[in-house]
Image (cartoon, grey):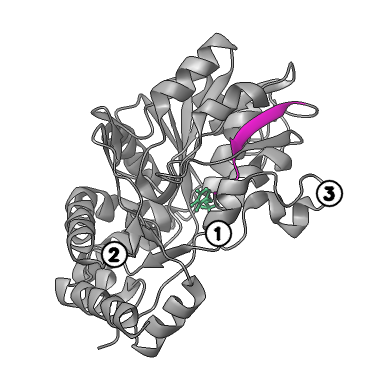
Amino acid sequence: MKVPFLDLQAQYRSIKTEVDAAMARVLDASAYVGGPAVLAFEKDFAAFTGTAHCVGLNSGTAALALLLQANGIGDGDEVITVANSFFASAEAISEIGAVPVLVDCREDDALIDASLLEEAITPKTKAIIPVHLYGQPADMDAVNDIAEKHELLVFEDACQAHGASYKGRPAGSLADGAAFSFYPGKNLGAYGDAGAVTTNDEVDATTIRMLREHGSMVKYTHELVGWNERMDGLQGAVLGVKLPLLAQWNDKRRALAAYYRKNLPEWVVPFAAHDDRVSAMHLFVVRVQDRDAVQKHLAEHGIQTGIHYPVPIHLQPAYDGMWKQGNFPVAEKMAGELLSLPMYAELTEEAAAETCAALKAFGAAR
Ligand SMILES: *Cc1c(COP(=O)(O)O)cnc(C)c1O
């Protein structure tokens, strides 16, 4: 049995009629950039995240960068994020001229270690970007308390956390603003690149609406130097069809995660799932010794896996000279042990069982 890591075609087949019709409406109206489908999605996604405003953009990276820029963060400022994340969490900080400052992650959940934040804060620090990695919200009370004490802004990197919650409140509503990505492989994925900011701050929302559109509110009047980072009409249409299904898809992911937790051999160690949070279960990541051999064994049995992420941000070549090996030991150790098992709503329990069986066979042969 072949078990793909992710199967985007299975999902498309299940919603093809609705998606095709929604896309046809955009094409009929030639509403290619922005337009009614994007406006409708923005309204629905703001409601979904329990926020006052959603601004549709062309990527999650743009969402992070625009949140910073809209708050006047730029040259010479420092923004803190976490070493174990997708590169864009730090890249967005660099893009707008600020300096990324990293802290290590926690051993138990792979999320930002809030106890390390205070020693990373300097007079130049302006904001903190906790990442809800793999779908589980970071410890937002701890991050927000420190931010309040030092008068810093907090922006959630919620690019993997559509539909997650922390103490009953939705990801996207837990700080001064949040960035979402709708890259096709995310829990809520477009059919191309897309992203959004959610926030309760009306001024930020307005500024980001301008920044995404060449700094203009009124056509050909440019009050700011901005970017071209709008959401496409076709993406808005696809997302509008998918959003009402997200909760049930996330439920399926969580059911599969529960299955994995019950049936994995004990040498395969999942991360802690905190009682005060509901994960969107974007990725089901475990830690194993001898990771490369385990991954190879699974591949030989037709089971595709991923590594999120094989190289921590501070050791990326683009940041050569800014940090060195040994700076963030937890993230470094983890990078050699992480393994992401197949996880998507359409994955069958039979396929998850196959994955567990292949892992047990590897353990028995060792
Ligand atoms: C996907 C992702 C991003 C970037 O989103 P894009 O839409 O690809 O630009 C940022 N941070 C994290 C944690 C992500 O997973």
Q: Residue at x 30, y 65 (%)?
A: 343
Q: Nearer the viewer, mark 3 or mark 2?
A: 3
Q: Is residue 163 above or below residue 141?
A: below
Is label 1 in contact with label 2 (beta carbons under 8 Å)?
no
- Pointer 3 with pointer 2, Cβ within 8 A: no
Which one is in front in this view, the residue at disc 1 or the one at disc 2?
A: 1
Q: Which residue is mark 2?
A: 344
Q: Which residues are magenta?
A: 77-84
Q: Secondary structure at mark 2?
A: loop
Q: Is residue 214 magenta?
A: no
Question: What residue is disc 1 on?
Answer: 335
What's the residue type where badge 3 is placed?
Answer: Gly
Secondary structure, magenta segment, majority class: strand
Residue type, mark 2 in image: Tyr
Question: Which numbered dot is residue 321?
Answer: 3
Q: Residues within 10 Å of mark 1 (few under 14, many from 20)?
A: some
Q: Position of residue 41 (x, y in %)?
A: 33, 43
Mark sitting on residue 291 = none
Compared across the picture, whether 69 is left or right of 175 comes to: right
Q: How far apart, in angstroms, are the residues tagged by discs 3 and 2?
A: 38 Å
Ranked by sequence position, the earlier of labels 3 and 2 is 3
Q: Is residue 275 left or right of residue 295?
A: left
Q: Secondary structure at mark 1?
A: helix
Which residue is rendered at x = 43% and y = 53% of the image? 182
Q: Is residue 95 above or below residue 74?
A: below
Residue 355 rendering spot, x and y as whole percentages: 27, 76
Residue pictured at 23% horizontal, 28% vertical: 168
